[in-house]
Amino acid sequence: MASTKKILRALAGERQDIPPVWMMRQAGRYLPEYRATRAQAGDFLSLCYAPDLAAEVTLQPIRRYGFDAAILFADILLVPQALGADLWFVTGEGPRLSTVTQQRDFDVLKPADAIHDTLSPIYDTVRILSRELPEDTTLIGFAGAPWTVATYMIAGQGTPDQAPAHALRQENTALFEALLERITEATILYLSAQIEAGAEVVKLFDSWAGSLSGEAFDRYATKPAQRIISELKARHPDVPVIAFPREAGDKYRGFAKATGADCVALDNSVDPVWAAQNVQCDGCVQGNLKSSHMVTGGQALIEDTRTIVQAFSGGPHIFNLGHGITPDADPENVQLMIDTIRGK
Ligand code: CP3
């Protein structure tokens, strides 16, 4: 029997008059209730590893807005931490990690199957959520894609151009590829464990895919995604996978076929009319409203929302932003977006 959940129906290829909607970073600092729970937890990582509180912040945007999906509250950088990297967050700046730039840094990393020791609280969060979510809400698990995770492990922080990771891949390809392989193995185990705990869909975030070009994109974005998806499908054939090769540009075309993803998420630099013809022809797409509309609101938000709904109305579509909502967003603009989609 077909699912009653709108997200699962879209992922199965069904066109719907009103597309399902959720938002990247929907549990986040723009919400006062998130800030309150985060203050209770202390810092961001303590919140990620406290299952009751992480489940609470995951549920907050579902209660407030009735989104069609909840995304597990965690972070892509928990995998490097579970592999043995030091990880901390500097307020106002972002993540910091111990770096992997030489063989001896790699040699002290743990094997992939050791990650569960650190990550078991995340699976507890998933278990709580699969019990507590409303019955029409889909639970999405996630991980970072190997290239994006590697860019943080190599640089020890976020970088505008991922230069340290590009340098390592050129100067010590063997070490770079060994690191990617370790992250790939860990990601397969991590996503499988999320699914076994109750995640109904998983999403792979390749936030820095756009900085790879030509053959490097195929080798370090497409191939690892394909490998992760085929291993997940072998274990859990019915669990859909969303791939997000952010800023892939022309490379969005054919990405679903090349990787086996059930849905490709689009960033807001992609023209929806182009994507309807060149990406949605292969299956479901997700996206792709500019996050800045959540700050500015008004008629421009309404018009762009309608344009996206219209452009993708011929096939399966999950409405989302093109990237995460930012802390300066106005919660009322989120409601305006949802009302526009649902025709209220
Ligand atoms: O989408 C969701 O609501 C689920 C939870 C989620 C978070 N991070 C929570 C978070 C998800 C899916 C992520 C993914 C993530 N994390 C990515 C890929 C997606 C993207 O944004 O490109 C990346 C690159 C990271 C790494 C990361 N985590 C950075 C660079 C930062 C600092 C930037 C910032 O916004 O402060 C984080 C912190 C982070 N992850 C926050 C949240 C809610 C903010 C932490 C806080 O409360 O201070």
Image (cartoon, rainbow, N blue to C red):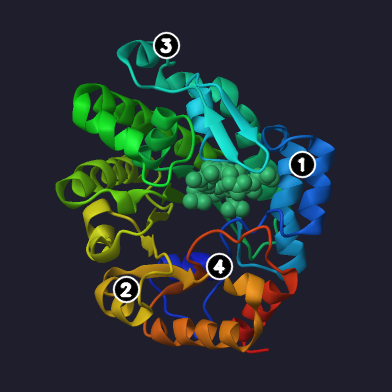
Whole-percent x and y of residue 177?
A: 25, 28
| Cα distance in 3D space between marks 4 and 2 | 22 Å
What residue is drawn where x is 32% and y is 69%?
Answer: 283
The residue that disc 4 covers is 291
The residue that disc 3 covers is 108
* Quadrant of the image occupied by residue 147: top left
The residue that disc 2 covers is 280
What residue is drawn where x is 51% and y is 43%?
Answer: 195
Residue 236 shows in this picture? yes
Label 3 beta carbon less than 8 Å to ligand 1: no
Q: Amino acid at mark 3?
A: Val
Residue 198 shows in this picture? no
In this rendering, position of residue 119 left or right of residue 152: right
Give 304 or 319, whichever is nearer the viewer: 304
Q: Amino acid at mark 2?
A: Gln
Q: Amino acid at mark 4?
A: Ser
Give 268 or 146, whichever is nearer the viewer: 268
Q: Mark 1: which secondary structure?
A: helix
Whole-percent x and y of residue 130?
A: 65, 49
